Amino acid sequence: MEEWSGSRRWNPFNSYKLLAHVYRWRLIERGKPAPQPVLVTVDPINACNLACPWCNAGYILDRRNRAMNRSALLELAEGLSRWRGSPEWPRGVESVCIAGGGEPLLHPYIGDFIEACTSRNIEVGVVTNGTRIHEHVEALSLCTWVGVSVDAGSEDLYLQLKGKDRFGRVTENIRLLNEAVKQNGCRLGTERPGYGVTYKYLLWNGNARDILPAVRKAKELGCRNFHLRPGGIPWDRLPGNRGRLFGPEVRDELARQISEARSLEDETFGVYGVTHKFDSLLNRANRFHRCHAVFMTAVFMPPVEAGRGDFNVGLCCDRRGDGRLEFSEGFTDFAQVERIWGSEAHWAIFDSLNLKECPRCTYQPHNQIFEHVIQGDSMTYRFI
């Protein structure tokens, strides 16, 4: 299955865009200040109002302190805007993905945080289950993109997967947001492929049959993109559970429906089936030797326990809740982050990582670029 139409090669889901950061990432070197990430993830809250079976944050929902307070979020926005990890790289953090140790729009001050970031020229993207969009339309309009994890194209399948009857609420919320964008004119409405509202679809056993109806629904609702990727086994359930998730019948159905869905593409709507981070059977394919991605991005999250700082910092969105990939201290101000980034404590986490314990890797392309382009110079990238 082709991931996307040939004419849509330059799209927001194409990992070739990571090559733009080679000059930042080549500064990653033991014993020297590490460059700050171009992107960080912020999980404002560890709570969710749905129960998706594939959730990669399920481990922390009942084990961690619930949420960051408002002052911590605003301090975070200010800190990210002035972060200078390496003196050789003057540009700071350029974007924030607000996502999930739960459902971010459940946080009562999420709008304040979005505004605090965008007012400091930090671009914001939000991943949401869509159930609370109607409460945050104005703030979401400030974002570059909003990805809504629907994962179904019909009410019955949505109920079967999510355990709650929210399909109608979510799809009407998507329509509401898209209509507001059209009427008001805002950043979210910028007419480029990477902007706007994306209907997200995580492939799971049982929902392959709904792909084409979901694509039709996405276009009807006014979405800019339809984005599908295969699901994976969360890190905490990986031991003893390494079987194949998708049989040939699922893969065949995926290819057939995506191929048919391509007929719905036009200048305002694209269909993207992102599979390049998997093998040909849609299983994990972490084809790299060391994880330098722990220096390329970070996850800011609520503290492990109430009273233990204002926020915590982890290094992998695919292993949320795994303390081995988190700094042990609770942070009370952003200066602490600047001091620990690239420190021996940071490199100690890098040294201790066992990739066999990793699930499907979001940052597989980051690591491949580091090993093959920066370390190995396999592309002689200085020659254009």
Image (tube, rainbow, N blue to C red):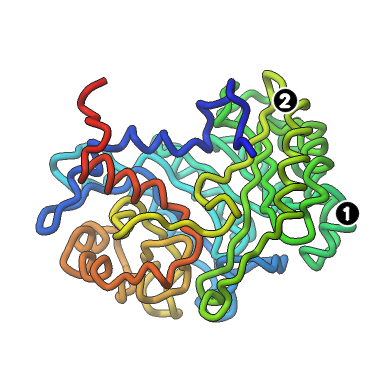
Q: Residues within 10 Å of mark 2 (few under 14, many from 20)?
A: some
Q: Is residue 88 left or right of residue 371?
A: left
Marks 1 and 2: in contact by CB < 8 Å? no
At a point 72% along the width and 65% down the height, the residue shown is 50
Query: Mark 2 — residue?
Result: 265
Q: Residue furthest right?
A: 156
| The disc label shown at residue 155, or none | 1
Q: Compare marks 2 and 1 and give the one earlier in the sequence.
A: 1
Q: On the rendered image, what quadrant is the N terminus found in?
A: top right
Examine the rendered structure and indicate whether residue 357 appears above or below residue 135. below
Residue 70 in percent (x, y) is at 48, 60
The label on residue 165 is none
Identity, as a three-letter code, of the amino acid under mark 2: Glu
Name the residue furthest front: 248
The secondary structure type at the circle numbered 1 is helix
Q: Which of 313/67 is in front?
A: 313
Viewer can see residue 381 = yes
Q: Position of residue 265 (x, y in %)?
A: 72, 25
> Residue, x 47% and y 68% (percent of image)?
320
Q: Mark 2 or mark 1, which is nearer to you?
A: 2
Tag 2 secondary structure = loop
The structure residue drawn at horizontal position 63% and vertical position 23%, both measured from the top left corner, is 185
- Residue 135 visible from this viewpoint: no
Q: Is residue 339 left or right of residue 118?
A: left
Above or below, 173 relative to 318 = above
| Quarter of the view holding residue 157 | bottom right
Query: Residue 176: x, y in percent?
Result: 77, 38
For residue 106, above or below residue 364: below
Instruction: Locate residue 86 relative to residue 249 in the image: left or right.
Output: left
Dividing the picture into quarters, in which one does residue 192 lie?
top right
